[in-house]
Every structure is written in structure tokens, then in C-alpha cells.
Image (tube, rainbow, N blue to C red):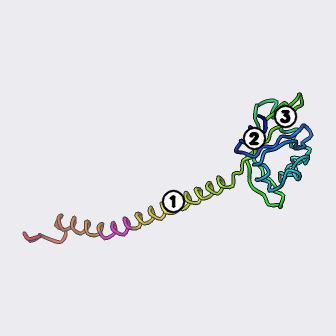
């Protein structure tokens, strides 16, 4: 049942002991990290995360897990071929056969970040378009007001009789 559950999880799952050694994982973890089981089993979790200091990662996670059920970490995961991918990693504590373990649920967020960047870019383009539209309306308004103001001034003066009496036709 345990293996069936582990293999059915969408995210990559890594089970890690208190020393940071990977003891179990699902197929999705192998796919994400582009390695086979023999290359992953028995390795340290920090080997698969960029800029994860071995001495800081697990104690920091343990400390946070004393206060909460889950800890979520944003990290760059390192594949066997040395390429990386951005990941959101939810870590929780698990007890298996009386031993404290950690479960790392790794979700590749590459597509999410690409979509977020595209959305931010679209917002910037829309803001620029709005500024250009506002500037256009302002310029058109100014260009129309200038001759209209002169015409209104001339008509007002004519109606006041500044230019003398007006013929009936006017």
C-alpha cells in the first residue's frame, strides 16, 4: 500500500532520514532529477538542491516543523545532468517504523514562473499602452482647445460689439 501511494503522488516525493540521506522516492522524483534509482538512493538531499547548505537546511526545516505541520521552500533543484529547475518544496515530518523522517514533496514550477513572467510583461505593455493613450488624448485635447479658444474669444468680442455693430446676417 505504501509503495502504491508513493507512486501515485503527482509531485516528486523524497523520503529523507534525519541526517539528510534519501531513503525512498517515487518514479516522479527520478523523472524530475533525470537519474535512476541507484543514483538517487543513499545520496544527501542537499546534492539535489542548488545553494542548499547541508549544515543549515535540515536544522532550519526541523526548527520550522516544530512550529508548523509543513514548511514550504522555494529552491532550484539540480538534475543529474547539472541542469536546474525552479521548485516549490513542501516538507513535513513523518515517522516510519519509529524513526523520524522527512518527506520532500517537490513541484516543478517552471511553467508557473513562465506564465507569471508573461503576465507581468503583458501588464507592463498594457500600462505603456494606457500611458500612450492618455498622452494622445491630452495632445488632441490641447490641439483642439487652442483654435477653439481663439474662435470663442473672437465670437465673444464680436457679440460684445468690440468690432462695431454686427450686420443682421451675422
Real-space Cα separation, disc 2 to disc 1, in angstroms? 35 Å
Tell which circle, 2 or 1, labels the residue nearer the N-terminal end: 2
Compared with residue 58, is residue 139 higher up or lower down, i.e. above or below? below
| Circle number at residue 114 | none
Q: Neighbour class for label 2 at 10 Å: few (<14), some, many (≥20)?
A: some
Nearer the N terminus, badge 3 or badge 1? Answer: 3
Quadrant the C terminus occupies: bottom left
**Marks 2 and 1 close (CB-CB < 8 Å):** no
Query: Against 9, is 84 above or below?
Result: below
**Which one is nearer the viewer's eye here, 109 or 143?**
109
Q: Secondary structure at mark 3?
A: helix
Q: On the image, which quarter does residue 83 sit in?
A: bottom right
Q: Residue furthest top?
A: 98
Residue segment shown in magenta: 140-147
Residue corresponding to mark 1: 126
- Give the prevailing secondary structure in the magenta stretch: helix
Residue 93 locus on image (x, y percent): 81, 33
Q: Residue at x 69, y 55 (%)?
A: 110
Amino acid at each position: 500500500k505504501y509503495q502504491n501511494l508513493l507512486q501515485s503522488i503527482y509531485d516528486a516525493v523524497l523520503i529523507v532520514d534525519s541526517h539528510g540521506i534519501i531513503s525512498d522516492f517515487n518514479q516522479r522524483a527520478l523523472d524530475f532529477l533525470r537519474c535512476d534509482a541507484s543514483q538517487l538512493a543513499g545520496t544527501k538531499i542537499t546534492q539535489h538542491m542548488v545553494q542548499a547548505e547541508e549544515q543549515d537546511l535540515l536544522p532550519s526545516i526541523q526548527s520550522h516543523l516544530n512550529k508548523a505541520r509543513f514548511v514550504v521552500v522555494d529552491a532550484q533543484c539540480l538534475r543529474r545532468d547539472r541542469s536546474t529547475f525552479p521548485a516549490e518544496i513542501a516538507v513535513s515530518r513523518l515517522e516510519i517504523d519509529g524513526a523520524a523522517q522527512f518527506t520532500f514533496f517537490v513541484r516543478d514550477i517552471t511553467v508557473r514562473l513562465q506564465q507569471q513572467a508573461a503576465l507581468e510583461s503583458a501588464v507592463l505593455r498594457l500600462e505603456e499602452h494606457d500611458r500612450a493613450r492618455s498622452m494622445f488624448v491630452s495632445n488632441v485635447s490641447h490641439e483642439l482647445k487652442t483654435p477653439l479658444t481663439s474662435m470663442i474669444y473672437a465670437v465673444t468680442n464680436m457679440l460684445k460689439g468690440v468690432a462695431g455693430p454686427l450686420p443682421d446676417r451675422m
